[in-house]
């Protein structure tokens, strides 16, 4: 069977589809189980795993605003604002009004936030290494490559969908 033929053959079939073989259900369950365990890692630092993710997203420049964090965390703006308020109150991040658009607040780590993210990274790395200890290096590389590929596909589709919605608004 060629790659072109294989691409046209649909993998999922209605009669055999269940949560046991649904990528969405499996990803959600893995996320839920991993999150529960990850929360215990940071409990003594009085930090949630989501708060740690915010610190790392800001540290690595993946997110710079609350809107960026909303998209990355799949949180609504209210939940993200509450999360950011907690981190500001703890002195881990700062908000700065954008000079280009006063409606936008740029987010930065404080030295304390940067130090905490750095201090906790080895703990999180150990967590993932322990969790993936039954996987070979090749399997982990394949898994992360496939997940990035799926992420890229979904992000591309989301951008296309947003462009379509904007065109619809203009056409009205």
Image (spheres, rainbow, N blue to C red):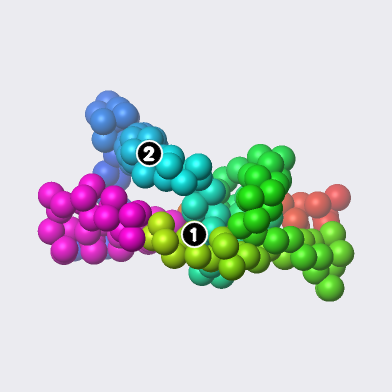
Q: Residue furthest bottom?
A: 100
The residue carrying pointer 2 sits among few (fewer than 14), some (14 to 19) or many (20 or more) residues within 10 Å by Cα, namely some
Residue 14, horizontal then vertical, whole percent: 32, 30
The disc placed on residue 116 is 1
Provide the major secondary structure of the magenta segment.
Answer: helix
Q: Is residue 54 left or right of residue 26?
A: right
Mark 1 crowdedness (10 Å alpha carbons): few <14, some 14-19, many ≥20: some
Q: Name the residue nearer the viewer: 33 or 74.
A: 33
Q: Where does residue 35 sit, x and y in percent of width and height?
A: 39, 40
- Quadrant of the image for the N terminus? bottom left
Identity of the residue drawn at 30% across and 63% down: 145
**What residue is rendered at 30% in x and 28% in y?**
18
Labelled disc at residue 78: none
Find residue 54 and report its image quarter.
bottom right
Residue at screen point 27% across, 55% down: 126
Q: Secondary structure at mark 1?
A: helix
Q: Which residue is mark 2?
A: 40
* Residue 24 position by quadrant: top left
Res. 142 visible in picture: yes
Residue situated in front as seen by the camera: 7 or 138: 138
Q: Quadrant of residue 136?
A: bottom left
In the image, residue 141 lies at what x, y percent?
Answer: 23, 64
Stretch of the chain drawn in magenta: 122-151
Q: Earlier in the sequence, mark 2 or mark 1?
A: 2
On the rendered structure, is 119 left or right of 129?
Answer: right
Query: How many numbered circles does the render carry?
Result: 2
Q: Is residue 90 magenta?
A: no
Query: Does 100 sit left or right of 152 as displayed?
Result: right
Task: Give the residue at x 57% y 45%.
Answer: 74
Where residue 19 sits in the image (x, y, percent)?
31, 29
């Amino acid at each position: 069977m060629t790659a072109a033929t294989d691409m046209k053959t649909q993998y999922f079939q209605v009669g055999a589809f269940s949560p046991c073989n649904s990528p969405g259900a499996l990803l959600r369950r893995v996320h839920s189980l991993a999150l529960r365990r990850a929360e215990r890692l940071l409990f003594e630092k009085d930090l949630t795993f989501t708060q740690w993710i915010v610190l790392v997203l800001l540290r690595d420049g993946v997110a710079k605003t609350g809107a960026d964090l909303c998209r990355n965390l799949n949180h609504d703006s209210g939940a993200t604002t509450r999360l950011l308020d907690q981190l500001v109150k703890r002195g881990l991040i700062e908000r700065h009004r954008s000079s280009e658009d006063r409606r936008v607040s740029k987010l930065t780590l404080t030295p304390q936030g940067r130090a905490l993210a750095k201090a906790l990274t080895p703990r999180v790395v150990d967590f993932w290494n322990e969790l993936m200890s039954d996987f070979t290096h090749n399997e982990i590389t394949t898994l992360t490559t496939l997940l990035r590929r799926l992420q890229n596909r979904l992000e591309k589709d989301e951008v296309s969908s947003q462009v379509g919605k904007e065109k619809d608004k203009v056409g009205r």
